[in-house]
Image: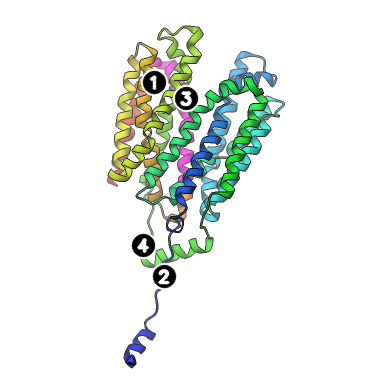
Amino acid sequence: MNQPAHSVLHATATPAHPPVSLSYAERNASHWKRNLTVCVFGSFTTLLSLSMLLPFLPLYVKQLGVESPGAVIQWSGIAFGATFLGTGLTAPLWGRLADRYGRKPMLVRAAIGMAIVMSLIGVAHSVHQLVVLRLIAGLVGGYSSASIVMVGSQAPRERAGWALGVLSTGALAGNLIGPLVGGFLPGWIGIRGTFFAGGAMIAVAALLTIFVIKEDFSPADQAQHRAASKASVATRKTNYAVVAALLVTAMMVLLANMSIEPIITVYIGSLGVHANHLTRVAGVVMACSAFGSMLTAARLGALADRIGSWNVIIGCLVLTGLVMIPQAFVVHWWQLAGLRVLMGMTLAGLLPAIAKLARQSVDESKTGQMLGYLQSAQFSGQVIGPVIGGQIGVALGLDSVFFVTGTLLVLCAALAQWARVR
């Protein structure tokens, strides 16, 4: 039977709506788990390579011609912090480029750049070259930061907290195991050989990134999706007050964790630990917070998926602030170690939940840039924390560091509650 003429005319006259293109996360739904696995391995190896120099960094600085004990300590601190400074400066730039050209190219760039620079550090001839190379490692590197952008963008919203928690566990494991590896590897292959080994590990991560990670990204598709979204629904408007609260909270996570670092050896010494065992015990206590975070990062990320990220953020901030206070009253080093484990367990829920909210607070076309700013905020806390902790310890006493940091965390929880209402 023929279709009535008026129906044909009606169908012809009605303009067809262009199909809404799939979002970036939807296009990569079949890749995100495999990509997460590679990103976890890459974050683990790169952070292990960057942190394994901690035990022998002063020895390397001395080997490069610095003789004064005070100058050795000073240059060691500058060289170590240079990488975090570089990463904090360039993270927003790499995030913006990830939005424009894709997440995978940023991972490849970071892995190759860090593999080359790590190997070059092994042939440095002066402490100035060491500092410059460490700075370049931060400027061109940032594999962990690029991984957060990829995983945070690709994982489904209902699984994003868990995925970011798993990624955080890999990064924490690298930071935890790195100093342990750096404690014995130079004895086998030498200090310079250790840097070559680190470069080789990152090169393996680079190869896996190039050949295993898959990404469906097209600038044309991104533009089409943005146009379709604007045509169908109002574009998400950025709430800058909420974004600012998230950035401050991210900074506070690292600030709280790092505030005790400059004085922890002195504080442990005041607890009666013998001088011959002081360095070893201090290293154990420093590692306790990372160990605690490894235990709960994925679980708290999954909890944020179930009960909401704001609930996890506020709860973890309050709990971490409360766990900070008893650290001022310990009388044995193992008590401090146990409390640092608990602190790490509560801190672990913050970064995945914050990253998940940061992803949802902006339009998809700005996800990478937003997560880049989040990384900069974290590295700011990593730099500011030791400075504040050292100044408070000198001016008000070692115990005061815990009281001040705990109070700041509780105030940050109040800020998060205010942002949540907005």
149 or 164, nearer to the observer: 164
Q: Is residue 399 above or below residue 228?
A: above
Residue at numbered disc 3:
386
Disc on res. 234: 4
Disc on res. 119: none
Disc 3, SS: helix
Q: Is residue 246 above or below residue 184?
A: below
Q: How far apart are marks 2 and 1 (CA)?
A: 57 Å
Q: Where is residue 366 in the image (x, y as percent from the top left)?
A: 46, 53
Identify the residue at horizontal 36%, vertical 84% (top origin).
Answer: 11
Q: Distance between the residues labelled 3 and 1?
A: 10 Å
Q: Give the range drawn in magenta.
A: 370-398
Residue at numbered disc 2:
19
Identify the residue at horizontal 65%, vertical 36% (top origin).
Answer: 117
Q: How far apart are marks 4 and 3 (CA)?
A: 44 Å
Residue at numbered disc 1:
401
The three-letter amino acid code for the residue at tag 3 is: Pro
> Which mark lies nearer to you, 2 or 3?
2
